[in-house]
Amino acid sequence: MIKSSTGLTNAEKLRRCFDGLGTLTSKEDVLRHFTHRVLLEAARKEGCAALMFASNSTRLAVQAISQISKGRGFALPIEVADNSAWYKDVIVLRPFRDVLGKELAILSVHDGLQTVVVPTLTTATPIKSSIDRLTEDFVIGLQRDFPSTVSTISRTAFKITTQYAEEGVGGCPICAR
């Protein structure tokens, strides 16, 4: 293990960071941010021109409502875009953004693909444990009763645009957006 000048390993620093966060929602947001940054840096290190996320339409609909609920609606054009050139050196692609979660599940069973379930911070927690968990339950519940819910949310979120690619628009020094 590598110790920094503070005498703490990176794992200890990360643990302290998460321990210092008050809510599960903030922990999920920080984890999502760190995961995205690690994947982006790995893509850069390996010389990849594109980074592909397997986010489906259901996941993106939940994410859109969740981000708006947390006051991050400004990030929607970047978060749900099928092809984002936000980072000049790596393009972020979402090839499954128009496919429902149920459709992917059926395709996986039909093709005999092995399913891997990765537990999240909110796995087996009450619905009200975080904004993301509450939003997911809300959207999935609506989808059950009104089958066009996810596609309506997704299509609406996909229509939102931003001028981030224009020359002279500065980026955030914290999140690089």
Image (cartoon, rainbow, N blue to C red):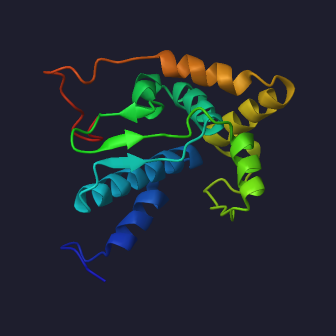
**Residue found 48% across the figure and 45% down from its top:** 29
Question: How far across and how far down the image is residue 77, in percent?
Answer: 42, 25
Question: How far across and how far down the image is residue 151, in percent?
Answer: 67, 24
Q: Nearer the viewer, residue 119 or 24?
A: 119
Q: Is residue 89 above or below residue 124?
A: above
Q: Quadrant of the N terminus?
A: bottom left
Question: How far across and how far down the image is residue 74, in percent?
Answer: 41, 22
Q: Nearer the viewer, residue 78 or 53?
A: 53
**Residue found 15% across the figure and 21% down from its top:** 167
Left or right: 140 in relation to 89: right
Residue closest to the far right: 145
What is the quadrant of residue 146 in the picture?
top right
Q: Nearer the viewer, residue 53 or 16?
A: 53
Q: Quadrant of the C terminus?
A: top left
**Residue found 71% across the figure and 54% down from its top:** 108
Left or right: 80 in relation to 134: left
What is the quadrant of residue 144 in the picture?
top right
Question: How far across and how far down the image is residue 40, in percent?
Answer: 32, 52
